[in-house]
Image: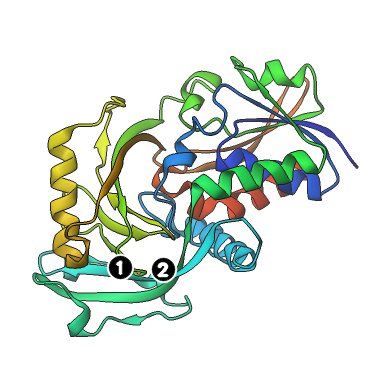
Amino acid sequence: MDLDVIVIGCGVAGLSSARLLQEAGHRVRIWARELPPRTTSNIAAAFWYPYRVFPRDRVDAWARDSYAAFARLVDAPDAGVLPRQALELFPAAASADIDASWSAALPGARPAPADDLPPGYVGGQLFDSFVVETPRYIPWLRARFLAAGGTIEARAVDSPSEALREADAVLHCPGLGARETAGDRAMLPVRGQLVRVENPGISRVIVDEHSGGAITYVVPRSRDVILGGTSDEGDENLEADPATTEAIVARCLALEPRLAGAARLGVLVGIRPCRPEVRVEREELQGGPVIHNYGHGGAGITLSWGCAAEAVSLLGA
């Protein structure tokens, strides 16, 4: 049965959900307080890596589904999905406590040879990943949605019930806005600061989230490299901090010395919509069903297609 569905939110969760709703035969509109490029999704480093997100069993399934979807998009013109080898690093202090089982079934997964490890690291793993160039990917996804007959409106709502007055069902993807639209006090803003530099000719993603404090990553895109990052819980300040920028660059240079001298192109700040657990579930309200799909933390791209597929399936439950 085809339905009139309103999707609340126009980040990667909302756009992915909207496209799958269209493929299922529904008529879809997007309402969002913030439209691209003014969304967190637009500035994300956006490589496939399930960072800071739970529950692990559901996350692993969603991430695998998204991995398969991105593999299909590598050859899509203008999508901006790049296959990349990734190196996850294990420092000595944390090596005994690291669970790397999530990556065991990934293509190319294997222990990193000692020659690949920067000083101070006792181990690591290599795996095949994807970098999603959000300045290309988000406009591409938006264009696909519009070409299939969807509409997008800059419109803030107080709750999903407001949208149900004009639709048969609502798919609720508000990101951090769930604090207001769902009254969800479990949402936690986590600030992330990134640095863009010219790409000096590198292609491998490098990530260390195990050294304590902030995650460090080097994410090479086609023409630039994203360097990160920070994980500042409860901080919603969108102003870049110069000292933090210098610390990020120094940490990344220690992982990838070829970045030395790379011209700086800018600094980006975004707020991750974190939650103790991702919320993908159906709720029955007066007027119709609401399917929640939010709380993806630092893994919005990584979980996008998997969570969208489950959310759309719940509409028919």
Tell me the kind of residue under disc 2. Answer: Trp
Cα distance, mark 1 to mark 2?
A: 8 Å
Numbered circle sitting on residue 77? none
Q: Residues within 10 Å of mark 2 (few under 14, many from 20)?
A: some
What residue appears at the point 62 percent right and 38 percent down from the top-left corner? 14
Residue 111 versus residue 187 in the image, above or below? below
- Expressed as whole percent of the image width and height from the top left, the position of residue 305 reads 61, 53
Tag 1's secondary structure?
loop
What residue appears at the point 21 percent right and 59 percent down from the top-left corner? 210
Q: Nearer the viewer, residue 302 or 184?
A: 302
Q: Which residue is mark 1?
A: 99
- Expressed as whole percent of the image width and height from the top left, the position of residue 304 reads 56, 50
Can you tell which quarter of the image residue 170 is in?
top right
Q: Are marks 1 and 2 in contact (CB under 8 Å)?
A: yes
Q: Is residue 297 rendered to the left or right of residue 154? A: left
Q: Which residue is mark 2?
A: 102
Can you tell which quarter of the image residue 201 is in?
bottom left
Tag 2's secondary structure?
helix
Residue 276 versus residue 33 in the image, above or below? below
Residue 53 versus residue 82 in the image, above or below? above
